[in-house]
Image (tube, rainbow, N blue to C red):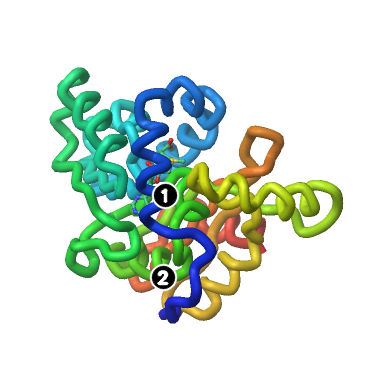
Amino acid sequence: MSSVSHADIDKQTVTKAYDRWAPVYDLVFGAVFERGREAAIEAAERVGGRILEVGVGTGISLRHYSPECRLCGVDISPLMLRKAQERVSEYGLKNVEGLWVMDAENLTFPDNSFDAVVAQYVVTTVPHPEATLDEFARVLKPGGEIILVSRVGAEAGLRRTLEHWFQPAVRRLGWRTEFSFERYTRWASQTGGVRLIERRAMPPLGHFSLIRFTKEGGETRSNDSERSSAAA
Ligand SMILES: C[S@@+](CC[C@H](N)C(=O)[O-])C[C@H]1O[C@@H](n2cnc3c(N)ncnc32)[C@H](O)[C@@H]1O
């Protein structure tokens, strides 16, 4: 598992940033990230069972899961989570087991608790992404899936230069622009028992990806072998 290294982003800044975003988050980021959320939910529903959404935010995805899925949600921002709680009441979502203020890097759930761990637009906002992925793998049952939708930084060219340039400013808004896909593949290769099974470009502009890992040791689900070769 990963050692925690110096972070370029800090938790307090991120919490404050998302507390400020909470009243307008859905308006600003609702439609723009919709396709990615749909893809993550489709993937999670194929796994089914008990699902943890990390960085659940305003709970914008919750009512779109099948009622058969049992949902738990965590977020570091109390004001984002309050919106999620209001949504659960508003839509009478009986399949939501609970919502907790919790740090993705220090989940308080026991090992092997969930069939899927979903994190949409979250991994690039945490101080220690690899340690956070370690936590996702720990709470995931063998055979389960980590399902991410995440920004992937450009490897070269003008976009890479602009991302580098904008990084200090966007950090204060609560995320990173620079984040190479290689960080995911390196994490998987250094972490025993997890395997990348899919990477698929997502809008806007293909700057985001749906990224799926499986935790080995359980039954193989869906068309993992096909997708695995596409991800390689
Ligand atoms: C860009 S928003 C994504 C929200 C939602 N998943 C969506 O699809 O719109 C990132 C979310 O991650 C949460 N977050 C950031 N750092 C976190 C951490 N260390 N632990 C838990 N949640 C965190 C933020 O508070 C925010 O709600």
Residue on which disc 1 sits: 14
181 is higher (above) or lower (below) than 66: below
99 is higher (above) or lower (below) than 110: above
Q: Label 1's element?
A: helix
- In the image, what residue occupies the spot 68% across and 53% down? 153
- In the image, what residue occupies the spot 85% across and 48% down? 158
Q: CA distance from mark 2 to mark 1?
A: 17 Å
Question: Is the distance from the Cβ of mark 2 to the nearest ligand 1 atom less than 8 Å?
Answer: no
The quadrant of the picture occupied by the N terminus is bottom left
Label tally: 2
- In the image, what residue occupies the spot 36% across and 67% down? 137
Residue 149: image location, x then y, percent: 51, 46
Residue on which disc 2 sits: 131
Q: Residues within 10 Å of mark 2 (few under 14, many from 20)?
A: many
Question: Is the distance from the Cβ of mark 1 to the nearest ligand 1 atom less than 8 Å?
Answer: yes
131 left or right, relative to 63? right
Q: Residues within 10 Å of mark 1 (few under 14, many from 20)?
A: many
Which amino acid, mark 2? Ala
196 is higher (above) or lower (below) than 55: below
